[in-house]
Image (cartoon, rainbow, N blue to C red):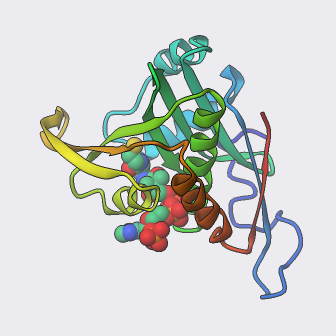
Amino acid sequence: MSASSGGARDGSARVARSGAGRDRVEVVVAPMRPRDLRGVLRIEEAVFAAPWSHRLFVEELAQRTSRAYRVAWVDTDIVGFAGLMAVDDEAHVNNVAVDPDWQGRGLGAVLVLDLVRVALERGLRHLTLEVRVGNEPALALYRRFGLSPVGVRPNYYPETGDDALVMWARDIDSDVYGRRLAAIEAAIPGDLGVTTRA
Ligand SMILES: CC(C)(COP(=O)(O)OP(=O)(O)OC[C@H]1O[C@@H](n2cnc3c(N)ncnc32)[C@H](O)[C@@H]1OP(=O)(O)O)[C@@H](O)C(=O)NCCC(=O)NCCS
Protein backbone atom coordinates (compact mmCIF):
# COMPACT_ATOMS: atom_id res chain seq x y z
CA MET A 1 0.00 0.00 0.00
CA SER A 2 1.32 3.41 -0.81
CA ALA A 3 1.97 5.95 1.90
CA SER A 4 -0.57 8.26 0.31
CA SER A 5 -3.48 5.86 0.45
CA GLY A 6 -4.09 6.68 4.10
CA GLY A 7 -5.58 3.28 4.79
CA ALA A 8 -4.31 2.93 8.35
CA ARG A 9 -4.32 6.56 9.40
CA ASP A 10 -7.53 6.30 11.39
CA GLY A 11 -5.73 3.82 13.60
CA SER A 12 -8.01 0.96 12.65
CA ALA A 13 -5.22 -1.28 11.42
CA ARG A 14 -2.92 -0.71 14.32
CA VAL A 15 -2.24 -3.47 16.74
CA ALA A 16 -3.02 -4.11 20.36
CA ARG A 17 -4.47 -1.88 23.03
CA SER A 18 -2.35 -0.63 25.87
CA GLY A 19 -3.34 -1.01 29.49
CA ALA A 20 -4.75 2.51 29.45
CA GLY A 21 -7.14 1.49 26.68
CA ARG A 22 -5.42 3.52 23.97
CA ASP A 23 -4.23 1.98 20.73
CA ARG A 24 -0.59 1.05 21.02
CA VAL A 25 1.24 2.29 17.96
CA GLU A 26 4.36 0.53 16.75
CA VAL A 27 6.69 3.05 15.13
CA VAL A 28 9.73 1.99 13.13
CA VAL A 29 12.40 4.62 12.45
CA ALA A 30 14.64 3.71 9.53
CA PRO A 31 16.90 5.28 6.91
CA MET A 32 15.10 7.18 4.16
CA ARG A 33 15.44 5.53 0.74
CA PRO A 34 14.61 6.96 -2.68
CA ARG A 35 11.61 4.66 -2.87
CA ASP A 36 10.21 6.34 0.28
CA LEU A 37 10.03 9.76 -1.34
CA ARG A 38 6.40 9.54 -2.41
CA GLY A 39 5.32 9.28 1.22
CA VAL A 40 7.90 11.83 2.33
CA LEU A 41 6.77 14.38 -0.26
CA ARG A 42 3.14 13.94 0.75
CA ILE A 43 4.06 15.20 4.22
CA GLU A 44 6.59 17.77 2.97
CA GLU A 45 3.94 19.33 0.74
CA ALA A 46 1.31 19.26 3.49
CA VAL A 47 3.39 21.08 6.11
CA PHE A 48 5.82 23.44 4.35
CA ALA A 49 4.95 26.57 2.36
CA ALA A 50 8.01 26.05 0.14
CA PRO A 51 8.38 22.26 0.00
CA TRP A 52 11.55 20.60 -1.24
CA SER A 53 11.23 18.92 -4.63
CA HIS A 54 11.63 15.21 -5.33
CA ARG A 55 14.88 16.04 -7.12
CA LEU A 56 16.29 17.91 -4.13
CA PHE A 57 15.56 14.96 -1.84
CA VAL A 58 17.21 12.59 -4.32
CA GLU A 59 20.31 14.81 -4.41
CA GLU A 60 20.39 14.93 -0.61
CA LEU A 61 20.04 11.15 -0.26
CA ALA A 62 22.92 10.67 -2.69
CA GLN A 63 25.29 12.49 -0.32
CA ARG A 64 25.57 9.55 2.00
CA THR A 65 28.59 10.60 4.03
CA SER A 66 27.44 14.11 4.91
CA ARG A 67 23.69 13.57 5.20
CA ALA A 68 21.39 11.39 7.29
CA TYR A 69 17.68 11.22 6.56
CA ARG A 70 15.33 9.12 8.65
CA VAL A 71 11.71 8.08 8.22
CA ALA A 72 9.11 7.05 10.80
CA TRP A 73 6.77 4.26 9.73
CA VAL A 74 3.49 3.06 11.18
CA ASP A 75 2.50 -0.09 9.36
CA THR A 76 2.99 0.74 5.70
CA ASP A 77 2.56 4.48 6.12
CA ILE A 78 5.27 7.08 6.45
CA VAL A 79 4.17 9.36 9.31
CA GLY A 80 7.20 11.63 9.61
CA PHE A 81 10.80 12.22 8.69
CA ALA A 82 13.88 14.17 9.73
CA GLY A 83 17.30 14.86 8.28
CA LEU A 84 20.66 16.38 8.99
CA MET A 85 23.72 17.64 7.19
CA ALA A 86 27.15 17.16 8.80
CA VAL A 87 29.50 20.14 8.62
CA ASP A 88 32.75 19.59 10.49
CA ASP A 89 31.56 18.39 13.91
CA GLU A 90 28.16 20.06 13.60
CA ALA A 91 24.84 18.45 12.77
CA HIS A 92 22.69 20.93 10.85
CA VAL A 93 19.09 19.77 11.11
CA ASN A 94 17.64 20.26 7.63
CA ASN A 95 14.08 19.22 8.31
CA VAL A 96 11.72 17.60 10.78
CA ALA A 97 8.13 16.96 9.78
CA VAL A 98 5.24 14.87 11.06
CA ASP A 99 2.06 14.06 9.15
CA PRO A 100 -0.58 16.53 10.40
CA ASP A 101 -2.82 13.57 11.33
CA TRP A 102 -0.07 12.32 13.65
CA GLN A 103 1.19 15.52 15.25
CA GLY A 104 1.07 16.03 19.01
CA ARG A 105 1.63 12.36 19.85
CA GLY A 106 5.35 12.45 20.49
CA LEU A 107 6.57 11.49 17.02
CA GLY A 108 8.48 14.76 16.63
CA ALA A 109 10.43 13.93 19.78
CA VAL A 110 11.00 10.35 18.57
CA LEU A 111 12.42 11.63 15.28
CA VAL A 112 14.71 14.26 16.81
CA LEU A 113 15.91 11.78 19.44
CA ASP A 114 16.76 9.34 16.68
CA LEU A 115 18.49 12.06 14.64
CA VAL A 116 20.62 13.14 17.59
CA ARG A 117 21.69 9.53 18.15
CA VAL A 118 22.63 9.20 14.47
CA ALA A 119 24.62 12.44 14.81
CA LEU A 120 26.46 11.04 17.82
CA GLU A 121 27.22 7.79 16.00
CA ARG A 122 28.84 9.91 13.29
CA GLY A 123 30.98 11.74 15.82
CA LEU A 124 29.12 15.04 15.59
CA ARG A 125 29.26 17.18 18.71
CA HIS A 126 26.94 20.12 18.17
CA LEU A 127 23.40 20.56 16.90
CA THR A 128 22.08 23.59 15.02
CA LEU A 129 19.05 24.58 12.98
CA GLU A 130 16.93 27.43 11.75
CA VAL A 131 13.27 27.64 12.68
CA ARG A 132 10.59 30.09 11.72
CA VAL A 133 9.93 32.67 14.41
CA GLY A 134 6.54 31.82 15.89
CA ASN A 135 6.56 28.11 14.96
CA GLU A 136 5.54 27.17 18.49
CA PRO A 137 5.28 23.38 18.12
CA ALA A 138 8.77 23.24 16.60
CA LEU A 139 10.18 25.65 19.17
CA ALA A 140 8.70 23.59 22.01
CA LEU A 141 10.24 20.47 20.52
CA TYR A 142 13.67 22.00 19.98
CA ARG A 143 13.80 23.58 23.45
CA ARG A 144 13.35 20.12 24.95
CA PHE A 145 16.49 19.09 23.12
CA GLY A 146 18.44 21.94 24.68
CA LEU A 147 18.48 24.08 21.56
CA SER A 148 18.74 27.77 22.46
CA PRO A 149 18.27 30.77 20.18
CA VAL A 150 21.51 32.58 19.38
CA GLY A 151 20.38 34.94 16.65
CA VAL A 152 17.87 35.86 13.98
CA ARG A 153 18.16 35.61 10.20
CA PRO A 154 15.81 38.30 8.87
CA ASN A 155 13.55 37.35 5.92
CA TYR A 156 14.98 33.84 5.92
CA TYR A 157 11.81 32.41 4.39
CA PRO A 158 11.32 34.33 1.12
CA GLU A 159 7.86 32.86 0.50
CA THR A 160 6.48 34.67 3.55
CA GLY A 161 9.23 37.11 4.54
CA ASP A 162 9.37 35.50 7.99
CA ASP A 163 12.51 35.62 10.09
CA ALA A 164 14.32 32.50 11.31
CA LEU A 165 15.69 31.90 14.75
CA VAL A 166 19.12 30.25 14.72
CA MET A 167 19.34 27.67 17.50
CA TRP A 168 22.26 25.69 18.88
CA ALA A 169 22.83 22.88 21.35
CA ARG A 170 26.52 22.39 22.05
CA ASP A 171 28.36 19.33 23.39
CA ILE A 172 25.70 16.76 22.63
CA ASP A 173 28.35 14.15 23.41
CA SER A 174 28.56 15.29 27.06
CA ASP A 175 27.22 13.33 30.03
CA VAL A 176 24.84 16.17 30.83
CA TYR A 177 23.36 16.02 27.36
CA GLY A 178 23.20 12.22 27.54
CA ARG A 179 21.03 12.58 30.64
CA ARG A 180 18.78 15.00 28.75
CA LEU A 181 18.35 12.43 25.97
CA ALA A 182 17.60 9.69 28.49
CA ALA A 183 14.92 11.89 30.10
CA ILE A 184 13.35 12.64 26.70
CA GLU A 185 13.33 8.93 25.87
CA ALA A 186 11.73 8.11 29.22
CA ALA A 187 8.99 10.66 28.49
CA ILE A 188 7.97 9.16 25.14
CA PRO A 189 4.25 8.46 25.47
CA GLY A 190 3.57 4.91 26.65
CA ASP A 191 1.33 4.16 23.67
CA LEU A 192 4.25 4.54 21.24
CA GLY A 193 6.48 1.52 20.76
CA VAL A 194 9.62 2.60 18.95
CA THR A 195 11.98 0.37 16.98
CA THR A 196 15.06 1.87 15.36
CA ARG A 197 16.80 0.45 12.30
CA ALA A 198 20.34 1.45 11.39
C1 LIG B 1 7.30 20.48 14.66
C2 LIG B 1 6.70 19.09 14.49
C3 LIG B 1 7.68 18.22 13.72
C4 LIG B 1 6.44 18.48 15.86
O1 LIG B 1 5.95 17.15 15.66
P1 LIG B 1 4.98 16.46 16.74
O2 LIG B 1 4.89 15.02 16.39
O3 LIG B 1 3.72 17.21 16.85
O4 LIG B 1 5.87 16.65 18.04
P2 LIG B 1 5.57 16.16 19.51
O5 LIG B 1 4.25 15.45 19.59
O6 LIG B 1 6.79 15.42 19.93
O7 LIG B 1 5.41 17.53 20.30
C5 LIG B 1 6.43 18.50 20.24
C6 LIG B 1 6.04 19.69 21.09
O8 LIG B 1 5.14 20.53 20.37
C7 LIG B 1 4.06 20.88 21.24
N1 LIG B 1 2.93 21.19 20.40
C8 LIG B 1 2.25 20.37 19.61
N2 LIG B 1 1.30 21.05 18.95
C9 LIG B 1 1.41 22.34 19.37
C10 LIG B 1 0.73 23.55 19.06
N3 LIG B 1 -0.27 23.57 18.16
N4 LIG B 1 1.11 24.70 19.66
C11 LIG B 1 2.12 24.70 20.55
N5 LIG B 1 2.82 23.58 20.88
C12 LIG B 1 2.45 22.43 20.30
C13 LIG B 1 3.90 19.68 22.08
O9 LIG B 1 3.17 19.97 23.25
C14 LIG B 1 5.33 19.33 22.38
O10 LIG B 1 5.84 20.22 23.35
P3 LIG B 1 6.33 19.66 24.74
O11 LIG B 1 7.38 18.66 24.39
O12 LIG B 1 6.86 20.86 25.43
O13 LIG B 1 5.12 19.04 25.34
C15 LIG B 1 5.33 19.14 13.75
O14 LIG B 1 4.52 20.08 14.40
C16 LIG B 1 5.45 19.49 12.28
O15 LIG B 1 5.66 18.61 11.44
N6 LIG B 1 5.28 20.78 11.96
C17 LIG B 1 5.35 21.20 10.57
C18 LIG B 1 6.75 21.17 10.02
C19 LIG B 1 7.69 22.04 10.85
O16 LIG B 1 7.37 23.16 11.21
N7 LIG B 1 8.87 21.48 11.13
C20 LIG B 1 9.88 22.15 11.93
C21 LIG B 1 10.66 23.10 11.15
S1 LIG B 1 11.93 22.30 10.21
Q: Give the residue drawn at x 54%, y 39%.
A: 82
**For the image shown, how many numbered marks are present on the structure?**
0
Residue 136: give x, y in percent of width and height.
Answer: 31, 62
Say whether residue 185 is left or right of residue 26. Answer: left
Is residue 146 left or right of 197 when viewed as pictured?
Answer: left
Q: Residue at x 52, y 53 (%)?
A: 177
Quadrant where the image shows the C terminus: top right
In the image, taking residue 80 as reference, residue 132 lies left or right, namely: left
The residue drawn where x is 52% and y is 56% is: 176
The quarter of the picture where residue 194 lies is: bottom right
Say if residue 100 shows up in the picture. Answer: no
Identify which residue, 185 or 100, lies in the foreground: 185
**Residue situated furthest right in the rendering:** 16
Q: Is residue 159 left or right of residue 39?
A: left
Residues 65 and 133: in front is: 65
State whether residue 86 appears in this view: yes
Q: Quadrant of the N terminus?
A: top right
Who is closer to the viewer here, 120 or 74? Answer: 120
Q: Residue furthest bottom?
A: 20
Q: Nearer the viewer, residue 37 or 1?
A: 37
Q: Residue furthest front?
A: 175
**Ligand 1 is located in which of the four quadrants?**
bottom left
Q: Hey, which quadrant is residue 137 in on the image?
A: bottom left
Residue 47 x, y percent position in the rendering: 42, 47
Q: Position of residue 98 (x, y in %)?
A: 53, 51
Estimate the x, y position of residue 85 in percent, counting from the top left.
Answer: 48, 25
